[in-house]
Amino acid sequence: MPTMKDEAPDSRIQWESLEESHNWIDSITLPEIRNIDETWRDLVQAIQRKARKNLGNREEKLNNDKFKNVPTLNEWKSHFEKLFSAKTPTLQLPELAPVENLELKIEEEDVEFSLKQMKTGKEAGVDDIPIDFWKLFPRAIKFLTDFFIAILESRKIPTQWKWAFIMPRYKGIGETNDCAMYRPIQHLSHTRKLFEKIFERKLRALGIGTTENQCGHKKNRGVKVAHRGLRSLLASSSPIHMAFFGHQKRERQCHTKMRLVGTEKTFSA
């Protein structure tokens, strides 16, 4: 696990006002694509420098009456290090045969199509560059296409893409100074998500994808579909034995929990 920073991060950029003022975007000087990490670092610095000058920083406001006592930065650091370093049982997956003659070529049409599919108004990752910026940037398609091709050729993604911007969200119960009473929401890089979306679309076009019986993270086959089917099975008179695997917090550690469900027990979604 990467070492967590001891200091607070820079203030987030006020991207909410981007729609009203985005004429400055085209003046950004894009770096030359060379080393992946260096290129991404120079790109982020160039975008953030212009964005902070034209949009300013976001003012974070808290309800002082409700959040009089909140955990300190050191307490958050200690809490998340324990949370994410907890040992959990691992599932041994069978090895799959490699796909022969697999050639993935990213073109500008792929980037343009996937960029239109991305939702706006979402919190950005560590780089603080939302997908809203790329949608309004006139030279985005050309640059991103060349950058993604360089990633495929080097077989290396930017190191910063492996990090997540974590925002603790209060659950609404318990003491506000208890780290366990907050839900850690992880925000990944939007540019990384765009790259993964293009990559996934390419693989699906080659017939490589998820199995037909998967529910969740699949179009028109959400988890609720499986819930409704399970309820119908439990309502029948035939004996049913099933095992569900989920995650549960106990003593502030995440571990795998197995729950057996039968016809004599009530299923709760």
Image (cartoon, rainbow, N blue to C red):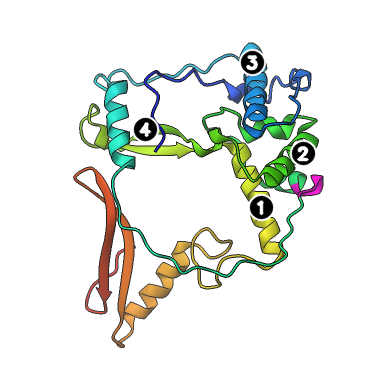
Which residue lies under the disc numbered 4?
A: 168
Quarter location, residue 134: top right
Which residue lies under the disc numbered 1?
A: 199
Q: Is the residue marked by circle 3 packed among few (<14), some (14-19), or many (20+) residues within 10 Å?
A: few
Label 2 residue SS: helix
**Measured Cα–Cα span from mark 2 to mark 3:** 23 Å
Which residue lies under the disc numbered 3?
A: 49
Tell me which numbered mark, 4 or 3, is placed earlier along the sequence.
Answer: 3
Tell me which numbered mark, 4 or 1, is placed earlier along the sequence.
Answer: 4
**Measured Cα–Cα span from mark 4 to mark 3:** 27 Å
Q: Nearer the viewer, residue 263 or 190?
A: 190
Does residue 257 show up magenta in the picture?
Answer: no
Tell me which numbered mark, 4 or 2, is placed earlier along the sequence.
Answer: 2
**Measured Cα–Cα span from mark 4 to mark 1:** 30 Å
Q: Is residue 231 left or right of residue 201?
A: left
Residue 52, label in figure:
none
Q: Amino acid at mark 2?
A: Asp
Q: Nearer the viewer, residue 49 or 82?
A: 82
Determine whether label 2 and label 1 are within 8 Å by CB: no
Q: Is the residue marked by circle 1 packed among few (<14), some (14-19), or many (20+) residues within 10 Å?
A: some
Q: Is residue 173 left or right of residue 168?
A: left
Q: Quadrant of the C terminus?
A: bottom left
Eye-nearest disc, 4 or 1: 1
Q: Amino acid at mark 4?
A: Pro
Which residue lies under the disc numbered 2?
A: 146
- The spot of residue 225 in percent (x, y) is 47, 68
- The spot of residue 232 in percent (x, y) is 38, 78
Say which residue appears at 76% left-offset and 33% top-offset. 140
**Measured Cα–Cα span from mark 1 to mark 3:** 30 Å
Instruction: Give the magenta-colored segment's residue range.
Output: 106-110
